[in-house]
Image: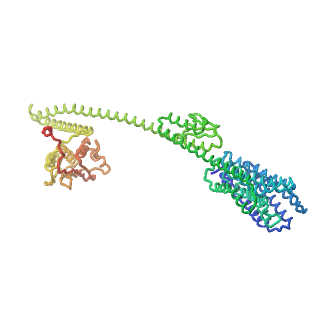
Amino acid sequence: MTGAQRVVRETEGVRRDDAIPWRAALAATILICLTYPLIASGHVVARNIVYNVAELGAIGAIVLGVRHYRPRAPHAWLLIAGGMLMLFVGDTVWAVYEFNGRDPYPSSADIFYLASYPLLAAGLAVATRKRTPIIDRRAPIDAAIVAVSALLFEWVYVIGPTLSDSTLSWQETVVTIAYPVADVVVLAVAARFVMGRSWNVAALRLLVLGLGLTLLGDVIYSVGVVDSQSSYGNLVDAMLLGGVMLIGVGALHPSMTAFTAEATEPDERPQVGRLILLGGVCLLPPILVIVQAIRDKPLDLAATFTATVLLANLVVARFSYLAARAGRTADHEATLSRYSAELLRARGRDELIAAASHVTSELAGDGRGRLILTGSTRPPTGHAISVPVEVRGDILAVLVADVNPTGQQRVRDSLTTVAVGLSLALEREHLVDSLRRAADTLAEQNERLRELDRMKDQFVGSVSHELRTPLTSMIGYLELILDDEVGPVEGEQRHFLEIVNRNCDRLNRLVDDILFVARVDAGRLSLEHHWVDLVRLTADSVDTARGAAAAKQIDIRLSADESLPPVWADPIRMTQLLDNLLSNAIKFTPPNGTVSVTASPHGDVVRLQVSDTGVGIPEQEIPKLFDRFFRASTSVATPGTGLGLSIVKSIIDAHGGTISVESEEHCGTIFSVELPLEADPPLQPASEEATAS
């Protein structure tokens, strides 16, 4: 959005009542322009009164608009009002001549008419300067193209014939030539205004349309196509009057402040209409040659040739400017691409800042740009361009440049790209540093964990060894005493020694469990696979557990399918698995309960199930059941370490099997183990003797 469009949007949103005056003025303009040609040429007084009053109303509209809307540079509008005032005075003087039946040429009215042109041109020039402080070099070239073509047209139809007419006095010649020259000057300034920046707002459209109608009417009169006393002359007068009144209507529109509002952003959009207009204007010399040839009129070849050469040079200058700008744009893009590559290659904050500083100086040119680290100081001020580099909410640096107004927008856009790239690169560097520190910290923690793991293994091995040695001695001596090898032991002494023996056995099993878990953690759990008769192995485990079950009056039952094929497994570990499951079932089943064991094939797996009618396990605790040292809330009154089921899970995983649990509190638990059936054992490596043979 241009600065002019911003002003329009702001002003149009402030007062809705402001639409009433300009719409009323527009309606009056249309009505007067439609009725003016109907006034007969003989009604001199009525025609002049309508014309002059309408002109005076347009001047008053400009003054009222300036007072009401207070534009940025009111003298631009007032200069245009001054030019229209000169036209009003000239028309008033000419009306006096008409009332007296006089038709002098030149007359004092021409002085006022000609004085209006410089005022109109000055108003447009001021507005152009205020609206476009950043010079667009295309606009003056385009205005010059329009001016050269218009001057050639005026030369062919007005200036040339006037200079060659010997019947005219020098005063008549000067005044006659002055009008088309003034028209060309105003047209050139108007073209510069229109082509400098977008004028696509209501007030400016009305202003440009009014100027266009005024200049077109002047050209028609200058060429002498119509007689001022004819009906066509009344139509041209209506055109001139409509042009003047439209300028007044534009001054009453709320967007009239856009006439002098600064438009800081360049209008880089493709302007197809502008190029078509310039193309048509450049075709004017050959068109004039064709028209004059058809009319069988002489043509000033020198003027035509001169205008053609000037137009050719202006077109070349315009395209040279476009080519140069395209080259500068390409250079900027190449510089920014190189900068992006440098950011990717750079390592560390210093290299990133150095790359940004270098490209800032290169884009601004002649050392007029640099990167300033802000730190804790305030950002620098007083530079034409200042672009902050923000990293994680803080302004780390500022890219500054002091360049000419013509290149400010391009350099600002480029430095914004540089700042964004630097911000992203510094963010990336910060993240890389954070990840690097996190990786270092993680590596240190992993090393500490490995060291702790080694210490744990050493501790477990040492403790297990230190415990097993006295335990073995204690168990051996207890067996000698209980076997009456050193004399009879009777009564309470034997009872107490049996308790000690049972606890020694329990402690020995605990040491075995701890060693087993340590081997699993260290990845040193080894299996000795054999073909295992699971039915016999299960029956042996059940027979072993019957003593403990009988002590609690628990009925233990076995149901095994005799056709069950052998399983490729470690028999010692499988026995340990079954012993742990049976021990758990008996331990957590109350007296007079039942423990059932089944073994049966199921497709390509064999299923072992151990079920009981014990205390059961709460549903929310089942997922934690195989965690080490975890004990269900229903088993707190029963002694144990919480390692049994963890060992069972490790053995099953080592055999490639699965285990599942079904349990209902106060009703019992079912453990289901599934082990894969293999048709053939794994291939064994050949012995050295076999290899040698």
Residue 408 x/y as whole percent: 63, 42
Q: Quadrant of residue 35?
A: bottom right
The one nearer the camera, 466 or 170, is 170
- For the C terminus, the quadrant is top left
**Image side of residue 8 versus residue 521, left or right:** right
The one nearer the camera, 513 or 573, is 573
Which residue is found at the position 16% from the left and 31% from the top? 473
**Image side of residue 514 versus residue 230, left or right:** left
The one nearer the camera, 541 or 64, is 64
The one nearer the camera, 208 or 580, is 208
Residue 646 x/y as whole percent: 26, 44
Camera sees residue 13: no
Count of number-bearing discs:
0
Residue 285 x/y as whole percent: 70, 56
Which residue is found at the position 80% from the left and 54% from the top? 179
Tell me the colour scheme of the image: rainbow
